[in-house]
Image (tube, rainbow, N blue to C red):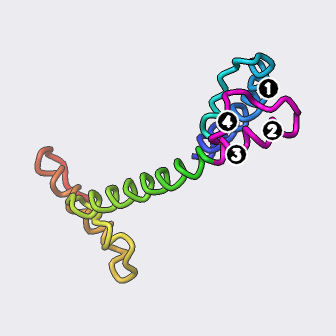
Amino acid sequence: MKYLAIMFLIGFVAMAVFGLFFMDQWMHQSDGGCIASTMNGSAGPVCPMNGIELFIHHFTAYQTFFTVLVPLFVFFIVALVVLLISERSTVPGPFPLADFWAWPNAGRGDQYRSKFIAWLAIFEHSPAF
């Protein structure tokens, strides 16, 4: 999980850095067709030529992306967690979630283990331990 978070962070930083470098590639033409200009509602599809104005112009476009995507991403993660918890609580298994975390029932693992070994002993001709 730690490596996944590191890879996600590296990918995000790489996209941000290389996106800023490649953003200036088409902006010196008069018909650049800047997507950030159409998103911000500017008068034309031409980006500002000044470096600071160019950065602010595109940064506000990135802000628009994140104001839409972050709540959607948070909703997706919350829905996934709720789904996993509901699936875990409805599937019967040798270690139910409520019994696993409850303090008085902490020793139930030995009971399940002994029942499992006794069940295995039925299929072989050796005594159960």
Q: Nearer the viewer, residue 19 or 28?
A: 28
| Label of residue 21 in the image | 1
Q: Residue at x 15, y 54 (%)?
A: 119
Picture residue at 67% right of the left edge, 30% below the top: 44
On the picture, is 57 further left or further right than 111?
right
Q: Is disc 3 placed on a helix, strand or loop?
A: helix
Q: What is the distance, in whole Å, between disc 1 and disc 2 at their CAs?
A: 11 Å
Number of dots carrying numbers = 4
Is 76 above or below relative to 89?
above
- Type of amino acid at the residue the image marks with label 3: Thr
Q: Residue at x 70, y 17 (%)?
A: 31
Residue type, numbered disc 4: Ala
Q: Which mark is residue 60?
A: 3
Check contact, mark 4 vs mark 1: CB within 8 A: no
Where residue 100 appears, as percent x and y from the top left, is 35, 69
Asked which secondary structure carries label 2, the reply is: helix
Task: Report the amino acid beneath label 2.
Answer: Phe
Q: Which image quarter: residue 124?
A: top left
Q: Locate the C terminus and report the quarter of the image it occupies.
A: bottom left
Callout 4: few (<14), some (14-19), or many (20+) C-alpha neighbours within 10 Å? few
Characterize the local packing of mark 3: few (<14), some (14-19) or many (20 or more) Cα atoms within 10 angstroms: some
CA gap between label 4 and label 2 equals: 18 Å
Q: Tag 3 or tag 2, which sits nearer the N-term?
A: 2
- Identify the mark at residue 55; answer none if there is no mark: 2
Q: Residue furthest bottom?
A: 104
Bounds of the magenta segment: 40-63
Q: Compute the Cα span from label 1 to label 3.
A: 17 Å
